[in-house]
Image (cartoon, rainbow, N blue to C red):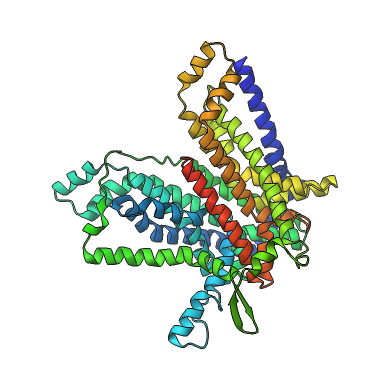
Amino acid sequence: MLARGRHALLAALAIAFALAIGAPLLSVFLSGIGGGGSLAPFFSILESGYYRDVIAFTFGQAALSVAVTLVVGLPGAYVFANYSFRGREQMLALATVPFVLPSVLVVLGFVIFFGNSGVVNTALMGLFNLESPPLRILYSWRAIVLAHSFYNIPLVFRLVSAVWSQLDERMREAAYNVGASRWDVFRDIEFPLIRQSVLSCALLTFMYSFTSFAIVLALGGARYTTIEVAIYNLAMFRGAYGLSSALALLQIAFLAVVVWLYMGVRVHGGAQGVRIKRSFTSLARWQKAGITAYAGCVGAFLFGPLASIVGESLRRTVHGETTYTLAWYKELFFPDTQGFIGASPPQAIVNSITFAVLAMAISVGVGLAAAYLLNGPLRGRGVMGVATMLPLGISTVTLALGYIVIGNRLGVDVSFWAIVLIHAIISVPFSVRTLSSSLAAIDTRLVEAAQGVGASRLRAFFSIEVPLLKGGLIAAAVFSFAISLGELAAAFMLYGGRYTTIPIYIYRYIGGYRFGSAAAMGVVLMAVSAVSFYVIDRMGARMQF
């Protein structure tokens, strides 16, 4: 009976995955090869110098983003892993906040902070009495790479420092005793043990940068386009679904290799033991100065854009005179007129919450069912584990394109539920890994004892396991809610002017140079993201990457 129930649950999950992911991908495939199985769209792309340049730039900016992320992030991971100082845990948690921020907030923060009239250029022009902005980063490859690094540096801090801090101190001391230098110890002992975590960060950063949408669309300008943005442009502006589908299939093929490599990475602590952290006060003066300078530069880079959003939301300039006011926040909740994008701020908030709640329910439900199966005696668990990670290798733009093609062929409007499903799909890997980890930590003897006194397996699950899963359930639910609330790409392709969400509202207002309204909405979204991460952290659920 128990085996029959597991197989029924597995069949239900397989059907759900086939409909939610398989169907749109199949529609993209069929559209890409044409009705007669023609490969003409692929040849059109590969023979075009423009699209070859787009593919090359996509790989190039992703690789460069990885390099910058590791170069800037690894010193911070070393400091967090090896030194003890006041507020260390709080600083590590705070430094992780940028990683969970919606991409549209990164765009807004970079525009306000690094723009020609932004905080940095205004300060430099005033300091050095310059007539023109000296730092021109926006609408260039530099802005794209910096924005991707902004996202992923915190990932290196958290993941690599967690592994680095578990290395056995005795190994390092033994090496010092036989005359090894600090560089020898790092090269021959420490790096081989943290290498898998570094590789994991590199591959994740590559995937996030490869499929980045909002950042490239907004900060790259007309000159710099990636595969993701090209798919969007072909489908939405040219109606060339065949070409966009072919390009999407190429992207899936490229990502499949990266995901395969990522799934082969096994991050662990290596030789775990006691790690003695040195006190920051015991360092030499030059070491303190170096760490302080590094922390100041990285802190300004990570939190300067966020602080500038908050400042812009409180500032209003009329006829050259700046005043500080809450007028932008008042406009959010008590708008006098309909927004110029066709939806008022309250409508955007309600739409976002509706999508987020529905996506959260689906993601947690699927995550709990998959985690239950992965922790049980089920054949093919490895295949199922890979399947639950599949959304990591599929861009939301590709999924949205698939649903658009389905809607066009069936002659029905699938926009609302397509947005909900895509938002749920992108958070399923986190839900599965978080709940699977929480479920594995439960002592199976408790369930066996309950069954021994007559409780059914289902009753034991809801009476014993679900209460013990509370932390993981809350973490998965909050993360799914926050991810949906901040997702732009799928909603941007599917909303059709009717389902304006908070990220769409912000993006449209950025395009209309209405930074005050965008910043006020951005602060609301930023607060939700920060609170979400805080709740996840307090629930004791590790960020499962």
299 to 388, vertically: above or below: below
Q: Quadrant of residue 476?
A: top right
Write the residue at 54% across / 29% down: 467
Question: Which residue is outermost to the left?
Answer: 178
Quick one: which residue is furthest to the right in this view?
411
Judge from the rendering whether residue 61 lies leftward or rightward of residue 178; answer left or right: right
**Is 163 positioned to the left or the right of 517 in the image?**
left
Front residue of this view, candidates 257 and 218: 218
Residue 222 visible in the displayed image = no
Q: Is residue 504 above or below residue 37?
A: below
Residue at image x 40%, y 52%? 90
The percent position of residue 317, horizontal first and vertical second, equals 62, 79
5 to the left or right of 385: right
Q: Is residue 405 visible?
A: yes
Give the total number of marks visible in the rendering. Answer: 0
Residue 193 is situated, as x and y percent measured from the top left of the image, at: 33, 44
Nearest to the observer: residue 432 or residue 42: 432
**Is 289 left, or right, of 12 in this rendering?**
left
Q: Quadrant of the N terminus?
A: top right
As displayed, is residue 516 above or below residue 214?
below
* Residue shown at 48% from the left, 60% from the top: 149
Percent of width and height locating residue 517: 66, 67
> What is the x, y in percent for residue 185?
24, 50
Tell me the residue at 29%/52% (across/down): 84
